[in-house]
Amino acid sequence: MDRLHLTDNTGAGGSPRQAVGDSRRLCGMFPAWPRTADDVAGPARLIPLAQRARRAAVAVLLLSLILPAVCRAAEEVSAAAPAGKPWKKHVLHEGTHTVTAVAGDFTGDGRTDVISSSEGKTRLFAAPDWQETVIHADAAHRFIHSEAMDVDGDGDMDYVGARYSPGLIVWFEQPDKPLETTWKARLVDDRVNGIHGLLTGDVDQDGTLDLIATSGQPTGDFPNSLAWLRIPKEPRKAGHWERYIFADRDAPGLSHYLGFGDVNGDGRPDIASAAKGGPQAEPGTGNWFAWWEAPKDPKQTWKKHLLADDQPGATNIHPADVNGDGKTDFVASRGHGRGVIWLEAPDWTIHTIHATLKEPHCLAVADLDGDGDLDAATCGYGDHTAVWFENDGKGKFSTHVLDEDQEAYDIRAVDLNGDDRLDILIAGRGSRNVVWYENPGR
């Protein structure tokens, strides 16, 4: 793991940084395998030729086994960044299995608050003291994902929660007294099923945010599909939102998260997703990253473009110009497998950001260090490790460890203390908490 390389004290007379230098020199000493036995045997030229040849063969064999591992280790260490300033951990909630948390001004005071969902209770944590208020309680409302958006157009932030299966999406109207009044729940949709991705975006470019959702189960009215939902004209009175299936049964394998942005430069926002595959999926499905090209009329079926189909445990994908060349690339993670990658446009060449991080089930892409390029953050719940990846602006990433004792199912990059720096908000799943990490700046 990269986190092991952030310690400078090895306890054995040398540091990992020194080890990197030594291993690099070792790798550089052998640009090609020795041309002759004498090249390996070195100065021992008085040894009989047959014996020297045998020794040379053994040396070559040992080097062939050892050098690749040493060189790979050197590359991983070189990718690890100096520890830098620590990000302070703030605990908002402890004690319940929490898989989603979202931020927004939910109290109307200009500060960024947090809403989480766990064990059938929707909890509001009001900034700056993070006092907890249960704004809704319903055993049927165990949400796996959530979003914040102004649904009714009244200028304040409402809350949207989604249950996985049987599929259900509801929205909660922010009342006049959000800390004193129960928030009323209203139906968005109850026919999409297997909602493991929920995202906002102006799909039809009418100036109002829409909602995007996966319908990832192979059963139900819209199996193996993706949908976007348009807010009706009178959302308080409507029985449900307008639903459009843009990926019609061509997203099999238990689709997960969603990404939103213009991929091909035609001015229309496209949508990306991923599917984890594995034993829970139908045989031969999943393990892919893909994007769907928006047509002129987004209410019609969209065209699917496969990015990669040998990605065990694929879960998250976000469009982003990673290397600053003006083209839209993708940052992605294998949240039910290992590793974080980015795919370079236009041929979708795969580059490794972190090869071994176990189960990075969440992913945020944003400029975390304020240097003008896009970085990334995740938390590998299999490794209990939260990290952020610093981009050098050209697509080379350095790993910074935030915490080595934290799980996560959901992650957000958002300014939680009003200092104009993006912090990291995590819903902790197995850690049974909601926490945020305060960005210390450069």
Image (cartoon, rainbow, N blue to C red):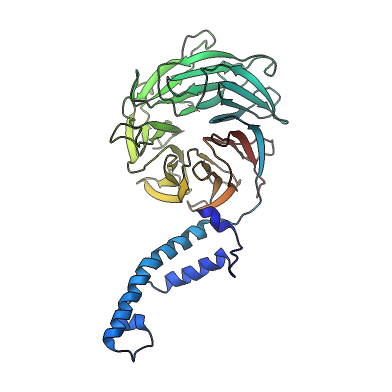
Q: Residue at x 71, y 24 (%)?
A: 109
x and y percent of residue 406 in the render? 57, 41
Residue occupying the far right of the picture: 129
In the figure, is residue 46 to the left or right of 432? left
Residue drawn at (48%, 26%) of the image: 202
Name the residue rendered at 32%, 79% in the picture. 56
- Which x, y percent locates residue 208? 52, 22
Closer-to-camera residue (203/402): 402
Query: Outermost residue toward the top?
Result: 237
Q: Is residue 48 above or below residue 159?
A: below
Q: Is residue 417 visible?
A: yes
Residue 283 position within the rendered picture, expressed as x and y whole percent measured from the top left = 28, 34
Is residue 33 something that shows in the picture? Answer: no
- 18 versus 412 height, above or below: below
- Horizontal side, residue 260 vs residue 36: left or right: right
Q: Is residue 125 left or right of residue 61?
A: right
Residue furthest left as drawn: 50
Relative to the observer, which residue lies in front, 54 or 172? 54
Relative height, residue 46 to residue 266 (above, below): below
| Image location of residue 313, percent across then percent down | 39, 40
- Seen at 52% across and 69% down, the residue is 21
Q: Disc count in the image?
A: 0
Q: Residue furthest bottom?
A: 46
Q: Kindly indicate the quadrant of the structure image that contains residue 192.
A: top left
